């Protein structure tokens, strides 16, 4: 019997409401697949920050290191500046565990209405592959002449050859494995003088290793416009930390709700645990009301099982999601229904038990 040890960090806001549903669904799928899952909870959050001045203990990363995967809700809440909560928990985990791939699938499910006219399931089905540990998201820089009229703020981006090549390689491999074999690169080489021409050059060089993959590149501004105008054009998209982040909120917005989108922070070499979370944040505006959509978390749970090598559980969870969305009886408010977070979780559990 295969068994997996999962570290669970529900975090803040609706993270605390959607994670229990993700766990229920995982347990239902594990029971039917004959898999043993053990969950260890870490209550690290903005509350921890208020009590201790830190988002997680000094040895937090050490505590996580031995797990097979990390299952995360959401981090950040009003009262703690976003950059402190992110740099106190999420970003150190991504970096310490070399989770340099952020994989974010985007799909229009049957039963959901795209805000874009005339889009059917199948028209929107792509992956965003986002560079996850370097690029524009950096703490290098600072402020000079602070408090004077001459204030200058510098914010450095970092693009290493290793970091650029490994994310491009991952994206090319993914594109190669798909039917359309089409990879689009998000760039801005007319505005970012050093980093993006470098990215473009590495992309063009690597394309030579993948003659079957059709490639193109778009500046991020027209890329966002294209994604809304013709999402069916895209198959695999690769972008830097910032551009990938932008595209992976825009993508799910085109599928009816950002709340179903998952985010896998992957260490492809499996030297360290990878981390799985919904794309959405802690949503303070709806926290505590039992109306949050747990599907982003559930889809993330499916990706976690796939990463751990259990395709059966992945497929089972995805099939349950598809069926429950298609049926439309237990949808949360953001998807046009009236179900609570827990009712939607229960519908998935029932679906798995009956399938
Ligand atoms: P972050 O910076 O952490 O990504 P954010 O500021 O982008 O956070 P979210 O917390 O993702 O914001 O919320 C954006 C909007 O989407 C809010 O109005 C929120 O209520 C809604 N939302 C987010 N997640 C869900 C969910 N799971 N179910 C329903 N609505 C959600
Ligand atoms: Mg956001």
Image (tube, rainbow, N blue to C red):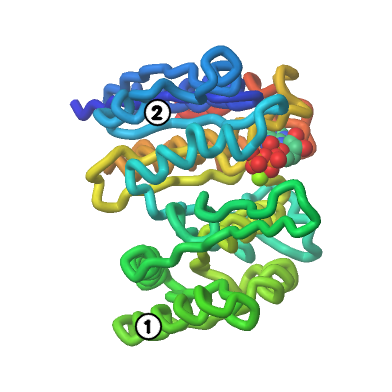
Give the image location of residue 332, x and y in percent. 72, 31
Which label's residue is closer to the chain start, 2 or 1? 2
Question: Circles 2 and 1: CB distance less than 8 Å?
Answer: no
Split into quadrants, the picture shows ligand 2 in the one at top right
Dot 2: few (<14), some (14–19), or many (≥20) neighbours within 10 Å?
A: many
Residue 318 disc label: none
Position of 132 compared to 229: left or right? left
Residue at x 57% of width, y 79% of height: 193
Residue at x 61% of width, y 40% of height: 83
Position of 269 compared to 278: left or right? left
Residue depth check, mark 2 versus mark 1: number of the one nearer the observer: 1
In the depicted structure, whether residue 206 falls above or below residue 165:
below
Give the image location of residue 268, x and y in percent. 30, 52
Label 1 sits on a secondary structure element that is: helix
Give the image location of residue 88, x and y in percent. 50, 33
Quadrant where the C terminus sits is top left
The quarter holding residue 95 reads: top left
> Can residue 237 be seen from the camera position used here?
yes
Residue pointed to by mark 1: 207
The yes-or-no answer for disc 2 within 8 Å of ligand 1 is no
Give the image location of residue 13, x and y in percent. 65, 24
Residue pointed to by mark 2: 29
The yes-or-no answer for disc 1 within 8 Å of ligand 2 is no
């Amino acid at each position: 019997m295969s068994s997996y040890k999962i570290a669970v960090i529900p975090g803040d806001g609706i993270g605390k409401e959607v994670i229990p549903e993700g766990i229920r669904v995982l347990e239902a799928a594990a029971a039917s697949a004959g898999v043993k899952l053990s969950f260890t909870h870490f209550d690290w959050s903005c509350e921890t920050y208020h009590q201790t001045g830190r988002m997680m203990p000094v040895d937090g990363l050490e505590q996580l290191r031995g797990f097979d995967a990390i299952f995360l809700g959401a981090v950040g809440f009003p009262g703690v500046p976003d950059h402190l909560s992110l740099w106190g928990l999420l970003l150190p985990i991504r970096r310490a565990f070399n989770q340099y791939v952020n994989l974010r699938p985007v799909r229009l499910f049957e039963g959901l209405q795209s805000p874009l006219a005339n889009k059917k399931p199948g028209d929107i089905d792509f992956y965003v592959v986002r560079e996850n540990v370097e690029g524009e998201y950096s703490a290098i820089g600072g402020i000079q002449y602070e408090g004077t009229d001459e204030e200058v703020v510098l914010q450095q981006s970092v693009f290493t050859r290793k970091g650029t090549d490994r994310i491009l390689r991952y994206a090319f491999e993914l594109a190669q494995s798909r039917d359309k074999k089409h990879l689009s690169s998000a760039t801005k080489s007319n505005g970012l003088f050093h980093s993006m021409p470098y990215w473009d050059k590495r992309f063009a060089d690597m394309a030579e290793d993948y003659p079957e993959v059709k490639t193109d590149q778009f500046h991020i501004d027209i890329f966002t416009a294209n994604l809304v105008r013709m999402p069916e054009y895209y198959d695999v998209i690769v972008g830097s930390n910032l551009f990938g982040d932008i595209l992976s909120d825009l993508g799910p917005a085109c599928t009816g709700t950002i709340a179903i989108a998952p985010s896998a922070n992957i260490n492809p070499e499996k030297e360290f645990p990878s981390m799985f979370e919904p794309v959405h944040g802690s949503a303070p505006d709806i926290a505590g009301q039992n109306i949050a959509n747990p599907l982003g978390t559930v889809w993330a749970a499916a990706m976690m099982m796939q990463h751990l090598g259990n395709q059966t559980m992945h497929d089972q969870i995805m099939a349950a999601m598809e069926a429950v969305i298609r049926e439309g009886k237990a949808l949360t408010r953001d998807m046009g229904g009236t179900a609570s977070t827990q009712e939607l979780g229960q519908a998935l559990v029932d679906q798995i038990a009956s399938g």
